[in-house]
Image (cartoon, rainbow, N blue to C red):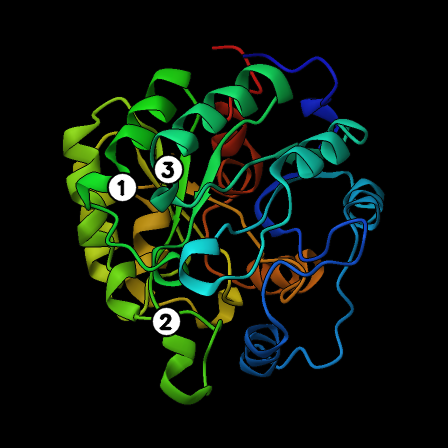
Amino acid sequence: MGDLTLDIDRLTAIDVHTHAEVSKDGHGALSPELFGASEKYFNAHGHRQSTIEEMADHYRERHMAAVVFTVDAEHATGHPRISNEEIAESCAAHADALIPFASIDPHKGRAGVREARRLVEEHGVRGFKFHPSIQAFAPNDPMAYPLYEAIEELGVPALFHTGQTGIGAGVPGGGGIRLKYSNPMLIDDIAVDFPELRIILAHPSFPWQDEALAVATHKPHVYIDLSGWSPKYFPPQLVRYANTLLQDKVLFGSDYPVITPDRWLADFEKLDIKPEVRPKILKENAARLLGLTTG
């Protein structure tokens, strides 16, 4: 699954975690209430929702590439998603900078499985994003297993939000969002039942950081992305494992636009990471995982 458009050698970094927040016609990925809660949580008031074209320019100027996705949570929220096809087509128009992931609500059953196959085979999608808390499902619920089976067969990774979320934070009842679904130990079951599926645990997984490290250390195809937090707030055990046991399985991610790559990288510079490990985290691990390099 090589990529002839993305010049890996030219890139300084690959950001594996960015959000398409608005469609071409101005439709938001989440309701205004949930968006507002996220902005308050991240102290990102007034941040304008970037179009995918603007995201491409942002990363291209920095000689970076970015994985782009939305979250399909139609079952739980009733809010229509941004089209996966639109994201894939927009990324294809900027294939020197953007890498499309898709999101399919597992509640869609066999229709979701068909969509997953179509998106990879016909639209060039290179992975799938799940947010168990927003999508209101336990990752190890058998309901989702046919979708994981298809993703495993297609040979692309599945990225799962883990830990607390800014979405719904401070809203009465958390906007109906249950944090328990984002415990990485639930994803350990998936790693057992789908041993060839590449899995990314997104974020420092507060309050389950040790669980995430345990799963990633124990299961060969489980990775961790470092998005959603400024590196200056990383738990010490995460930094220790990133420097040692997990140096080939930790990935740069920002959570753009609520955290920009500039801010993340400036704080990462100050982190006590071995010089030989930095390029692995910033680019090499992601390039290998996403099939952007040979070997």
Q: Name the residue at 19% across, 51% down.
A: 186
Distance, label 2 to label 1, CA atoms, is 33 Å
Tell me which corner region of the image, top left, top right, bottom left or bottom right, holds residue 91: top right
Amino acid type assigned to the residue bearing label 2 in the image: Ile
Q: Is residue 186 left or right of residue 243?
A: left
Up-down relation of residue 169 to residue 136 (above or below)? below
Image x and y of residue 213, in percent:
24, 51
How far separated are the C-alphas under marks 3 and 2? 29 Å
- Name the kind of residue labelled 3 in the image: Lys
Which numbered disc flags the more N-terminal residue, 3 or 2?
2
Residue 249 - label: 3
Would you say 180 lies left or right of 64 here? left
Q: Which residue is tagged 2?
A: 177
Which corner quadrant of the image does residue 8 belong to?
A: top right
How many neighbours does mark 3 have within 10 angstroms: few (below 14), some (14-19), or many (20 or more)? many
Total labels drawn: 3
- Helix, strand or loop status at disc 2: loop
Tag 3 secondary structure = loop
Q: Secondary structure at mark 1?
A: loop
Q: Is residue 232 left or right of residue 8?
A: left
Residue for badge 1: 245
Label 1 Cα crowd, 10 Å radius (few <14 / some 14-19 / many 20+): few
Disc 3 to disc 1: CB gap under 8 Å: no
From the top left corner, tell me how far across and down residue 75 is, in percent.
41, 55
Camera-nearest residue between 255 and 52: 52
Residue 88 on image: x %, y %: 67, 32
The three-letter code of the residue at mark 1 reads Leu
Q: Residue at x 78, y 38 (%)?
A: 63
Q: Residue at x 61, y 16 (%)?
A: 122
